[in-house]
Image (cartoon, grey):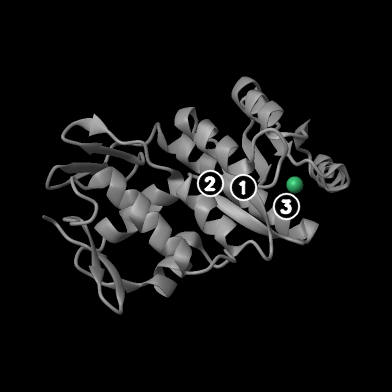
Amino acid sequence: MNIKKILIIEDEKSIADIIKFNLVKEGFEIDMAYDGKTGLDKALSLKPDLILLDVMLPEMDGFQVCKRVREISTVPILILTAKEEEVDKVLGLELGADDYITKPFSMRELVARIKANIRRTDLIASLQDAPADVQEFGNLAIDMNRYEVRKEGVPLELTLREFELLKYLAGRENHVFSREQLLEEVWGYEYYGDIRTVDVTVRRLREKLEDNSSDPKYIMTKRGIGYYFRRP
Ligand code: CA
C-alpha cells in the first residue's frame, strides 16, 4: 500500500504537533499549515489523501477553506471542532466536509476516524474498475457499483457519504427509514455524529438531485418518521 499523505491545518501548534507525532507513528506522511490561507494553498498543490481541518484559523477560517477545496476536489475532509460549537458540525457538513471530530478527542479515536475515511476512498477508487450496475429512476441513472450518478446524462458531483445514502435509499425503494437507522446503516457504528447529520446530507443530496429541492420527487420525507426514496 502506498503511503498516505495527510494535511493538518491547525493554528494551535501544540495540538498540531501531537497529532503529527501520532500520525507519523501510524505510518502517514504529514504536511502542516498553521493558517487557513496556507492550508488552502497546500490542499490544492500537495493533493493530500485526507485533510484535517480546524475551524477557527487565522487568515481564512476552516469553513472557507472547506468550501474552496470542495469546489475542485473530493478529498476527505475531517473537521476539528470545539465541543461548545455545535453549529460548526452542521455548517461543516453543509460545506462538504465528510466528517467531524469534537475537541478534545483521543488520538485513538482520531486515528480510527482517519483510517475509516481513507479506507472508504480506497474502496471507491477500486470500484472504478468494477463492472457497471446502472439502475434508472426517472431522470436519474445511478451506477450502484461505480458510485456514479447522472441526471439526464449529466454526471453529478456527490461526496461519498451523499452517494452512500442515495444508494442505500434507492436500493430499498419506498421503504421508510428513521434518521437513527440511516445513521447506523450508512454512517456506521463507528460514527459518533448526531441525527442532524442525516438531515444535512439529505438536504445536500436534494439540492443536487432534485429540480426543486423544496418539492422533492426522489428523496421523500415521511413526517415524524424519516426518509424514503421514491421512483418519480
Ligand atoms: Ca484554531
Instruction: Where is residue 58? Give x, y as percent.
Output: 73, 37
Query: The residue tagged with tag 1: helix, strand or loop?
Result: strand
- The answer as to whether callout 3 falls within 8 Å of ligand 1 is no
Instruction: Where is residue 166? Give x, y as percent.
Output: 32, 53
User: Which quadrant holds residue 159?
Assistant: top left
Question: Can the viewer see residue 202 in this picture?
Answer: yes
Q: Amino acid at mark 1?
A: Leu
**Residue that sits furthest to the top in the current view:** 45
Mark closer to the observer (2, 3): 2
Q: Amino acid at mark 3?
A: Val
| Residue topped by disc 1 | 78
Q: Earlier in the sequence, mark 2 or mark 3?
A: 2
Q: What whole-number distance in Å separates the C-alpha atoms at marks 2 and 3?
A: 17 Å
| Residue topped by disc 2 | 97
Name the foreground residue: 184 vs 78: 78
Q: Amino acid at mark 2?
A: Ala
| Residue topped by disc 3 | 111
Badge 2: how crowded within 10 Å, few (<14), some, or many (20+)? many
Question: Can the viewer see residue 5 in this picture?
Answer: no
